[in-house]
Amino acid sequence: MNRREFVKLTGSGMTAGALAEAIVSAQAAKTPAPAPAKGAPNSKVKFKVGTQQGDSHAILTAMAAFGCNNICSELPSAKMDENWTVEALTKLRERVESYGISLDMVPVTMTSAAITGAQMPAIFLGKSPERDKNIDDICTQIRNMARAGIFQMKYNFTIVGIPRSGTVKGRGPGTTYSEFVLEKDAQKDTPIALAGRVDEDTYWERITYFLERVVPVAEEYKVRMGCHPQDPGLPKGYRGVDAVLASPEGLKKFVSIKESPYHGLNFCQGTVSEQLEKPGEQIYDVIRYFGSRKKIFSVHFRNIEGGRLNFRETFIDNGSVDMLKAARVYKEVGYDGMLMPDHVPRVEGDTGSMQGFAFAVGYIKAIIAAVSAEG
């Protein structure tokens, strides 16, 4: 959609969700569906719109109104306390369900924070016996989730966190996009003192140590473990760390370490796009690779402009990736989880980016309707 068409729509008084649906309809008209392969099944989509914006009353009320009926909750607690008991997790699930919403996923205490702010740094630093205690705690979280009726978790295995180099002007006045340009990153050559030098072999050893102990528990309790890729793609030795989950090849190795239907990815499409030189051309085959192997457990459905080591996080409809085409690939591989908004731009006056997330939810719902209607 060109700027003139967008401005005309935005001046029409539409809500964020309705505006998103109008944009998708315009895009769908310009991007005809590919002809189905001979003998291909004619099925409806199995995936649905979801959100990871939290489980507060305000969020749940809005999501129920928007028809977003599946969510990932907030982190119950940053430490092992009473919030991780079966009773507390059951109450969380029941509270979410009281709004007519399914609690599909819960994050565990391995978040996207850099190592200096990690809840369980010993796991990432390979420091025993502390990491064994922390791994036992993760296993307890998994067991208690299952006993509370929650069967999917998300986690990160990052040391450097989520680096960004600043912000740039976005679409329209008062809008900014988060940006990562390696050359502008003032910290890129500054080692993380707490981590020291972490080479590729060392990083893989720490990941393998974790997976060998946790995946069997996830299998026993039938909880799917979705790991978030390293955000963004990074060169070897960034801040002294070889971030092995910062490329599709690294992610392929990751899912093969411990083969299990309960070991896979919290597939952040935006992050994986950041790992590619030409995401507008390459992302579809990456989705196809992991999706056809049933390694995509959930999707952060966001867009970027640019590519590896030089990108901006845009609105969902104006980045380098054709999101309608991406959704068609998720349908092709039979993906059945959530498509969730993620990292929306900042708009002046939009407290908590709620308008941005509403726009993204409406856009995703419209994309699902468009792809579902196709043969």
Image (spheres, rainbow, N blue to C red):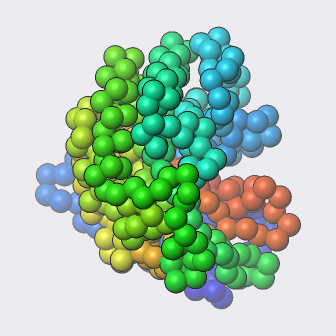
Q: Which residue is drawn at the image coordinates 58% and 72% (left, top)?
A: 187
Total marks in image: 0
Q: Which residue is drawn at the image coordinates 55% and 52% (left, top)?
A: 194
Choose top left, top right, bottom left or bottom right for residue 51. Answer: top right
Where residue 111 sits: x, y (%)? Answer: 56, 43
Front-lying residue, 221 or 351: 221
Front-lying residue, 39 or 188: 188
Residue 331 visible in the picture: no
Residue at the extreme left: 38
Quarter the N terminus occupies? bottom right
Where residue 241 sits: x, y (%)? Answer: 43, 60
Where residue 83 sits: x, y (%)? Answer: 68, 21
Q: Is residue 146 above or below residue 330?
A: above
Q: Is residue 10 above or below residue 256?
A: below
Residue at the extreme bottom: 4
Residue 122 visible in the picture: yes
